[in-house]
Image (spheres, rainbow, N blue to C red):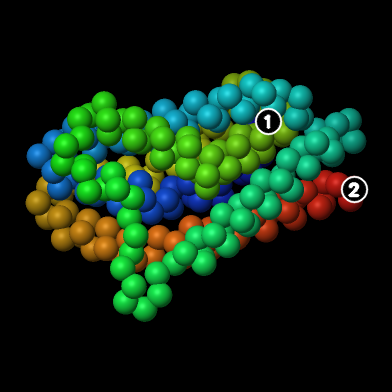
Amino acid sequence: MGEAIGQILSYGVGVALSPFPIIGVVLMLATPRARSNGPALVLGWVLGLSLVGTIVLLVSGGAGPSDQGQPADWVSALDLALGVLLLWVAVTHWRGRPRGDEEVALPKWMRTVDSFTPAKAGALGMALSALNPKNLLLVIAAAEAIARTGTSAGGQATALAVFVVLGALGPGTPVVLYFALKERSKHMLDGLRIWMERNNSAIVAVLCLILAAKLVGDAISGLSS
């Protein structure tokens, strides 16, 4: 189990550092329904990560190491494919980053958070965690890494739970600050939102580049052994 947990730490951090969900939850915490919509988005985020991770674990049942302790060739090929896709995401975000005083383009839903219900906030959280290309690729990579360690079903479930908790730290931290500090959190959260808005593309690009290098490196090592 320890090996499985060790494999997913970097992916969990990569999911946690997702600017748009953090910006979204901060915006919701400034609305009249803050006390319900903020936690609802985080709950949806957790459910999305858990659902995709569980599906990948079930599908990857045969991804354990061979008798020689090496991953199957298809597992290494999957790592390579995920690495290439993450590299594509990195390049796309880097090329789309704002330059100079250029206005940051934000999703349309961020302008309508005042009208969100808890159900809609939860659905948004699920979509951001399970359908966003970066997060989807990282969840698949994490679940596949857990499966290929060959640990028990209980160990895999525990490792996935650790991954989900790590991934929830990003959008979850503003909610904790809101309830713990109340009005005192406003200035801090506004500063975080502004910084995330400005640096969203660069953050995603750097994270994806680092994790793509890890996956491609693992794939080359597996295919050449």
Residue tagged 2: 225
Expressed as whole percent of the image width and height from the top left, the position of residue 1 reads 63, 32
* Classed neighbour count for the residue bearing mark 2: other residues with Cα under 10 Å, few (<14), some (14–19), many (≥20): few
The x, y position of residue 188, in whole percent, is: 21, 60
Q: Residues within 10 Å of mark 1 (few under 14, many from 20)?
A: many
**Residue at 28% across, 44% down:** 109
Q: Quadrant of residue 58?
A: top right
Is any atom of residue 199 visible in this view? Answer: yes
Kind of residue indicated by mark 1:
Ala
Assign a secondary structure to mark 2: loop
Q: Residue at x 52, y 67 (%)?
A: 95
Disc 1 and disc 2 in contact, CB within 8 angstroms: no
Q: Earlier in the sequence, mark 1 or mark 2?
A: 1
Q: Residue at x 20, y 30 (%)?
A: 117
User: Hey, what amino acid is under mark 2?
Assistant: Ser
Q: CA distance from mark 1 to mark 2?
A: 20 Å
